[in-house]
Each structure stands twice: as C-alpha cells, then as structure tokens.
Amino acid sequence: MTVPVDPLTALAGQEHAVRRLDAMAANPPQSIVIEGGDADTRVALSLYWAMLLNCRSAQPPCRSCASCRQIADQVFNDLLFFDGREGLIKVQSIRDTRGVWGQPPNGDGYRVTIFAEAQMFMTESANALLKSLEEPRPGNVFVLTAPQRERLLETLVSRSWVVTLAWPDQRDNAPDVAEWVDSLVRFWRTGQGWFERTSPKGAVDKDLAMQVVLGVQRELREAMIGSNSTSASSQLAQAYGPQGLRRIGLVLDQAQDALNTQVPVNPSLVLDWVATRMI
Ligand SMILES: [Zn+2]
C-alpha cells in the first residue's frame, strides 16, 4: 500500500499561478494550458483547478471533503485524467471519450479533463480533441499541461488560457534578466533609468517580457518571505510593506495575463505599464 501524498504540496512557492486560477474559477474558460514548473507541479495545479471547480466550500478548496479527496486520488467521477507521463496519448482513447464530453457532468460542479504532459499527444489525437473543443459542452473544461506551450499544437493553445508556473530549476534570474529586473526595481524607487531600456525598437520581445515578469515575481517571493538574497529583493522589502508587495503581485499577474492572451500586444508597452503602475 502506498502512503497517500497530498499532490498540492508541489504548489508551494507558486502563489501567482494559484491566484490566477482562483480568479478564473467564477467563470472558467473551456480550456487552459499550464506551462512552466516541473511535471509534478503542473499536475498539482491541474488537480487544484479540479478542486476549485468542484469543492462545495468554494475558495480556497477545503482539500478534505469527499470531492477534494477523490480528486487528489484521481478517482473523482467528474475527473478524466490522461497521463502523457506514461507514454503517448492515443487517438483511440480520445475518440472513446468523446461521448462523455457530450454529456453534462455527473455532479454539481464541472467535469475536468486533464491531459498531463499533452506534448505526448500524437497529432492525430490532438486533432480529435480539437473537435471536442470546437463544440463546447456546458460543464466540461479541459486542462493541457506541457513544459512550454510551443510543444503543443498551436490550434489547441490558441483556444486556451495559458497559465505559466515559475520554473523551479532557475532559483536565480539569468544575468540579462536580472539586469532588467534590477532596472525596474530601481525605477520604482527613483523614477529613472527605465524607458531608455524599453524604447529602442525591438528591444523587448514577448519572451523577454515574460522572463522579466517571472523574474520580478521571483524577487517578490524572496522579499515576501524575508529572504533578501539579492539586491532587488532586499530593495523591494525595504521600499514596500506587505500591502505594497501584494499590489506588485497583482500588477505582475495582470501583465502575465496580457502577455498570455492571443491578442497581439506590444511587449515593451506591457513592461512600461508594469513600471508606471508602481510609481
Ligand atoms: Zn473540498
């Protein structure tokens, strides 16, 4: 017998992603993509989403009612779990399930279908799933997890909300990202030295903007737990109280949303917006 492990323990340090799902729970999108983190964290966040949409005590999910416990054990009857960690997700299993997706959920919440490590889809399977996403059925929502969204079929990603987890194996920001983060924090404190970075044409692409947002989130987390291991995190801790740090967190969440939408955005304007919001 294996000792049950609470799968949500993997979510420690991922408050930003958790908060984004909390905010989306009132009106859940039909499909979300979870990228970043490691495979276990992505699965944990998927299960958290299923709990949010099915726990009677709403937010945060209680993790102890029958629904929450069954979701944690992956035996909940409105949870379908396809595990790409165990090999390719086969087209036949998608076709066999399409009838279920055509039905309303069994309980009062949502039927949540999770494709863990969905990059293990064969293209044929992904296309079969796409057909189901194109005919939305009330009460059915989907989660696709992958290391990066680029590993998934573009047509699946474009129909989904993307949630990005912090990458755990990068404890420190890469030097070039750290420079951006330092400049941003300095700008918040002094009002100087920012726009000359973002204004040159092509200085910021979407990828860099996301790295900077994730980089500031990382420093913010350090500042919040009082581990001021870097200059940026100790400056943040000195300049802002807990309330100010939380406000920065919300601004960063909104920036991440803006960068994750399918609508084309100008990534340097998103960063400028982040910069000016905290002045
Ligand atoms: Zn519960």
Image: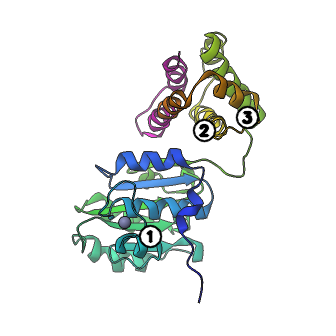
Q: Earlier in the sequence, mark 2 or mark 3?
A: 2
Mark 2 neighbour class, 10 Å CA radius: few under 14, some 14 to 19, many 20 or more: many
State the SS at label 3. loop
- Rounded to the nearest angstrom, the CA distance separating label 2 from label 3 is 17 Å
Displayed quadrant of residue 228: top right
Q: Is residue 21 left or right of residue 185?
A: left
Magenta stretch mostly in which secondary structure?
helix
Q: Say which of marks 2 and 1 sits in front.
A: 2
Q: Are marks 2 and 1 in contact (CB under 8 Å)?
A: no
Q: Is residue 142 above or below residue 187?
A: below
- Please name the residue shown 48% across and 56% down the image: 153
Q: Nearer the viewer, mark 2 or mark 3?
A: 3
Q: Nearer the viewer, residue 219 or 215?
A: 219
Q: What residue do we see at 73% from left, 31% from top?
A: 178
Q: Earlier in the sequence, mark 2 or mark 1?
A: 1
Residue interval drawn in magenta:
252-279
User: Of callouts 3 and 1, which one flags the residue occurring earlier in the amino acid sequence?
Assistant: 1
Q: Amino acid at mark 2?
A: Leu
Q: Residues within 10 Å of mark 1 (few under 14, many from 20)?
A: some
The mark found on residue 21 in the picture is: none
Residue lying at 59% horizontally and 72% vertically, measured from the top left: 85
Q: Which residue is the site of mark 2?
A: 214
Q: Secondary structure at mark 1?
A: helix
Q: Say above or below: 258 vs 131.
A: above
Q: Is residue 262 above or below residue 99?
A: above
The numbered mark at residue 125 is 1
Q: Which residue is disc 3 drawn over? A: 228
Residue 26 picture location, percent across and down: 29, 49
